[in-house]
Amino acid sequence: MSTAKFTVTEHILPACYIREYAGSTVDQEDVLHLHIKQYTPRELPDPVPADAITIIAAHAVGFPKELYEPLWDELLARSAHSNFYIRGIWIADVANMGMSGVLNEDKLSMDCSWMDHPRDLLLMINHFRDQMPRPLVGVGHSFGGTIITNLALMHPRLLTSVILMDPVIQRLPPKMGFGADPPGPVNFALWRDDVWPNRAAAAASYKKVFKKWDPRCLELMIQYGFRDLPTALHPDVGDNVDAADPPVTLTTTKYHDVLGQVRERFHAGMSDGQVQLDRLTHADVDPSVAVLPVYRPEPPSTFNKLPSLRPSALFLLGGDSYLNLKDLREGIKSCGQGVGGGGGKDKVKEIVLPKQGHFFAFEIVGETASQCASWLEEVMRGYRDTEREWKEKRQKLAKRDHLVLGEEWRRVIKSPSSFRKAKPRKNKL
C-alpha cells in the first residue's frame, strides 16, 4: 500500500474564515480545522527535479481521503515510464467529513457549502508553499472535481492542469430522490443504517454494496470509513460491549453526507406569482428551480464559469455515471474559451470509460491511473517548453529592466505636454 511507496505525513491546519453559510458551524466564530495527508515518494531523485509535480487532490462526498491511496500508488508506478516525477501529493478531508469532521464534530452544524473547501485548499497551499513549488496539478473526484475547478477559477494561474474525474458540474440537477424521482444517492445516505455491532459487521455490509471495488480501496474504506463508538452523534455504547471489538459508526456522519449532496430550502414557494427568496440565507438559489425543496448551487454556477477556466483540463468520465453527461459535455465544449480561459481546444480533453459508473476511481484503479499518467506526460511536455521560453526571455533582462518601464511605455503613453492645446491666434482688426 501507499506507506510502502510514500512517506505519509499528517498535518492539522485551521480552515478558512468566514464560512460560506452561517449555519455551517454552531457559532460563526468557531475555528474549524483540516486533517491533511502529504504523500512524498520514498524514491525521489536527489536532487528532486525542478519540474517534479505537486498534486493537490480533493475527494468525493462522504468518502475518506485515504481511499485514493491505491490510485497514488498506481500513478507513481506509471510516472517512472511517463517522463514526469511526482514531488508529493496533498489531500485534505473536507471540514465536515472524514478525519476533519472528527476534529470538528463539536463545532459543526447542519449546513455545508462546496465553496469553502477551495478556499481551505488555497490556504493550505500558501501555508506549505515551500514544499510545493510549481507545477501544481489539481485532481478531483465527484464534488472534489467541482472543488478543484473552483480553486482554479479563484486563482487562475495556480494550477498548471486539472484532472476532473466524473466532476459534478452541470446545469440541471440529477435525480434527487423526492416526489416522483426514483431513489438516488441522497436517499441511500439519509435512510441507511449508521451503527454496526462491530467493524466486521460494517465491513460485511459494505462489501455487499461495493462488490466492484478494487480490494485495496475496500480495505481502506473499512479502515478509515468507520470509527469506534462513542462519538458526539452516538454517545451511548450500550451494555456488555467488548472494548476490544466495539460498535462502529460512519466516520463521516450520514447527515453530513446528505448535506454534501443537497441543501435544503423546505419553505420554497411563490407568493403573488413571484419566487420568494431569503437573500440572507439562500441568495445562491437559481430562480428557475426555486420551487424545489432541496438544491445544490455549485454545479450550475461552476458550469457557467467553465469558459474562464485557465489550466488545461482532462475530463475523465464514467460512461454509466448517474450524472447528466450530456449536460456536462456542453460545458466541456466551451471550457477555457472565454475571457480569462486557457484557450480550450487542445488544452481540454474528454475521455469516457465505457460501462463505468461514478466510482471508477475505486473500481478500475489501474486504468484510471494510466489515463492520468498519459495526460500528465503531455501536460509536462508543454510545461517544460513554456518554462524554457520564459526563462530565456527573462535572462535577457538587465537588472535595471526590473526597476523601470521600457521605452515602449513612453511611446504608447504620451507625455501630458503633448495634450496641451495650442494658444488661440489673435486676429488682426
Image: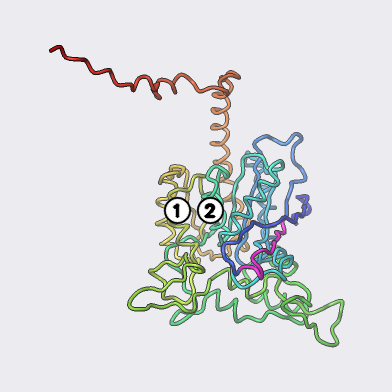
Q: Residues within 10 Å of mark 1 (few under 14, many from 20)?
A: some
Quadrant for residue 270, please give it: bottom left
Whether the magenta-drawn stretch holds residue 26 is answered as: yes
Is disc 1 placed on a helix, strand or loop?
A: helix
> In this view, which residue lies farthest toward the front?
429
Which residue is nearer to you in this view: 399 or 373? 399
The mark found on residue 246 in the picture is: none
Of residue 283 and residue 243, the one placed in the foreground of this image is 283
x then y, percent, for residue 317: 51, 58
Q: Position of residue 339 (x, y in %)?
A: 41, 44
Residue 30 or residue 148, whichever sits in front? 30
Check the image and report above or below for 85 versus 401: below
Q: Which residues are magenta?
A: 24-36
Residue pictured at 81% horizontal, 86% vertical: 238
Q: Secondary structure at mark 2?
A: helix
Quarter of the image with the C terminus in it: top left
Image coordinates of residue 292 in percent, x first then y, are 44, 75
Q: Earlier in the sequence, mark 2 or mark 1?
A: 2
Amino acid type shown at disc 1? Lys
Proximity of marks 2 and 1: CB atoms separated by less than 8 Å: yes
Q: Residue at x 55, y 28 (%)?
A: 390
Secondary structure mainly formed by the magenta segment: loop
Q: Residue furthest left?
A: 429
Q: In the image, is 105 to the left or to the right of 368? A: right
Give the CA separation, mark 2 to mark 1.
9 Å
What residue is pinned by disc 1?
A: 305
Which quadrant of the figure contains the N terminus? bottom right
Decide which of 135, 419 is in the foreground and name it.
419
Q: Quadrant of residue 273 in the image?
A: bottom left
Q: Assess whether residue 166 is covered by the magenta stretch.
A: no
Give the residue type at disc 2.
Thr
- The residue where tag 2 is placed is 149
